[in-house]
Amino acid sequence: MLRILIVENDPQLAETLKYVIEENAYYCVVGLADDTASAIAAAETHDPDIVLLDLQLARGSTGFMVAARLSDLHIPVLFVSGNAPNFPMPDLALGCLAKPVTAEEVHCSLAIVEDILRGRNTLRRKLPANLTLYDTEEDTQDEETGFVPSNVSLKTRLTHWVTRHYAQKEALVQ
């Protein structure tokens, strides 16, 4: 069973996604969150296999910070966003499913993501037109700094570095 956390600022869309996902008996939505704090708390509580993460969250927060924190927790992310990034970010997510989405696109995308997570080399169905997968095979993490190199984007690397150091400062203050 694939345990899924949905992080979406639109409560109606979050409930619709939950309903669509749970049409498949092999998928279980373990929680819903709408901002950074609730997303991290839900991830720590429910230990999902994958997080479907919107990039625009409630209370002015963004999915990028959530993705970086989830990366530290070794929880994979699939962005689900109406404003998909125009560059790949394999150090933050497996890929991006661009909104609007149909039930068929959600189910097909989850099947593909589950194959990736389970290490299956099965013959996959054709990718939905609005799903972009990020290539992560060449990425390796520097154990000392936690930095995940990516030859795709300097902006992605800087976002990861800043978020990690911000989280470390927060931990020191508390």
Image (cartoon, rainbow, N blue to C red):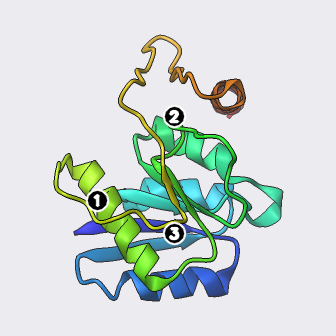
Amino acid at the residue labelled 1:
Glu
Q: Amino acid at mark 2?
A: Asp
**Distance between the Cα atoms at labels 1 and 3?**
15 Å
The reply to whether discs 3 and 2 touch (Cβ–Cβ < 8 Å) is no
Q: Judge the density around disc 1: few (<14), some (14-19), many (≥20) Cα neighbours within 10 Å.
A: some
Which mark sits nearer the N-terminus, 1 or 3?
3
Can you identify the residue that label 1 sits on?
114
Residue visible at 37% across and 76% down?
107
Give the secondary structure at mark 1: helix
The residue sitting at 43% across, 37% down in the picture is: 135
**Amino acid tagged 3:** Ile
* Closer-to-camera residue (129/33): 129
Q: Is residue 128 above or below residue 74?
A: below
Residue at label 2? 91
Quadrant location of the N terminus in the rendered image: bottom left
Can residue 42 be seen here? no
- Give the number of the disc on residue 6: 3
Q: Closer to the N terminus: mark 3 or mark 2? A: 3
- Are the two marked residues, 2 and 1, in contact with CB atoms closer than 8 angstroms? no
Residue under the image location 66 percent in, 46 percent down? 64
Question: Dividing the picture into quarters, in which one does residue 92 lie?
Answer: top right
